[in-house]
Amino acid sequence: MRAILCSFVLVMLLSGDAAQSTKRAKVALYNGGPQHTGVYDTKPLMELKGLKWKFETEGDVTSPPLVHDGIVYFGDWEGYAYAVDVEGGKEKWRFMAGKAVPGPPTIYREHAYFGSREGYFYALDLETGKVKWRFETDGVKLEKDGSVCFPPLIKDGIAYFTSHDKHLYAVDIVSSELKYKYEAENGMCCSPSMMDETLFISDWNGNVYAMDIETGQKKWRFKAGKKIYHAPAISDGVAYCCSYDHFAYAIDAATGKEVWKFEADDKISADPAVYDGMVYFNTSNSHLFALDAKTGKRIWDVKKDGKVWAKPAISGGVVYFGSGDCHLYALDAKTGVEKWRFEADDMVCNPTVYDGMVFFGSGKSLYALE
């Protein structure tokens, strides 16, 4: 069951919003920024000293941690969102969202924006964790599943997020008013990725959609064989995504045409990471693949034990890979050669790299390594 929970994945990078120029207006996004490459422009952890601290939670932590201004933000499956000090692992605040919080927030100015499986989308005060406002999805209104599992993309004052109720929502972050919504073929559990003025989302029917960010109109749709949990990673005009049909896909981001596909040995629920001409993803049986980004040919692979659904994180030429065998591995990005490993108490979910440290969830704990 915990392995399935890890399918709700992935991690963060401080990146300047194109429409803003001041430090105050910067956005903290998980997953390496709006293109979801999984690459962190920060000091990597090249040599492991050991555990810096471990923070105990109420529920399992499969949420990718997000770090901003010395605080790490994440959620758990008991329904809590947490803010914890990076240096000492001390709790700053926690917020009870009613049901599971599978993902971290997106941070913009003084607020943290995130959703929960109760079907609400929240804006919390960054200092206190108090609610500024909450937005009710159609799923809640209709007494159905309106879960909002992963954080929004925020651009020009609008939060874009998806729900199990099949909708992409665009909501004003000041007024909490709906700008538009788009109904997909099936439920969605992804944080939108972006290239230029195009949003990318995916649904459980195996569709990838390219959407005009301003109007919410569909530009194209690509169909895979089975469900796709997360929006694609975007790099050099190509959208890379993975499916339960065992395939990783490269799609032309402008046209929606398939460039290549690669068949792995098991289902893949997380989106891939993309770095220096290579694409990285791990299957549900802890098998990490590294492919050539242009051709889709396998360069190397590493097989571990146990079931897990998670995305690797990359920093400074190192791939950080969480496995079902309860280990976090640090591998050379070019060769796959192991640099170090760390053993946790449970399967390792969705690492994040920040200033020479690595953060990840395992069981009912958030770990900080140095």
Image: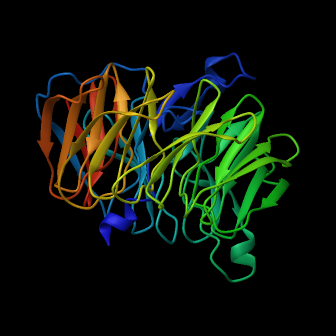
* Image vertical order of residue 276 relative to residue 167, above or below: above
* Image vertical order of residue 79 relative to residue 140, above or below: above
Question: Which residue sits furthest top?
Answer: 21
Question: In terms of depth relative to the viewer, which is nearer, 69 or 245?
Answer: 245
* Image vertical order of residue 325 relative to residue 239, above or below: below
Q: How many marks?
A: 0
Q: Is residue 84 visible?
A: yes
Residue at left offset 75%, top offset 23%:
19
The quarter in which the N terminus is drawn is bottom left
Q: Is residue 168 left or right of residue 282?
A: right
Question: In terms of depth relative to the viewer, which is nearer, 46 or 76?
Answer: 46
* Image vertical order of residue 232 relative to residue 228, above or below: above
The quarter in which the C terminus is drawn is top left
Q: Is residue 156 left or right of residue 78?
A: right
List x then y, in percent, for residue 89.
Answer: 27, 41
Q: Is residue 59 visible?
A: no
Q: Quadrant of residue 169?
A: bottom right
Residue at left offset 35%, top offset 59%:
266
List x then y, in percent, for residue 177.
Answer: 83, 54
List x then y, in percent, for residue 2.
Answer: 31, 67
Question: Which residue sits furthest bottom?
Answer: 143
Q: How is the image coloured?
A: rainbow
Question: In terms of depth relative to the viewer, which is nearer, 77 or 164?
Answer: 164
List x then y, in percent, for residue 284.
Answer: 33, 58
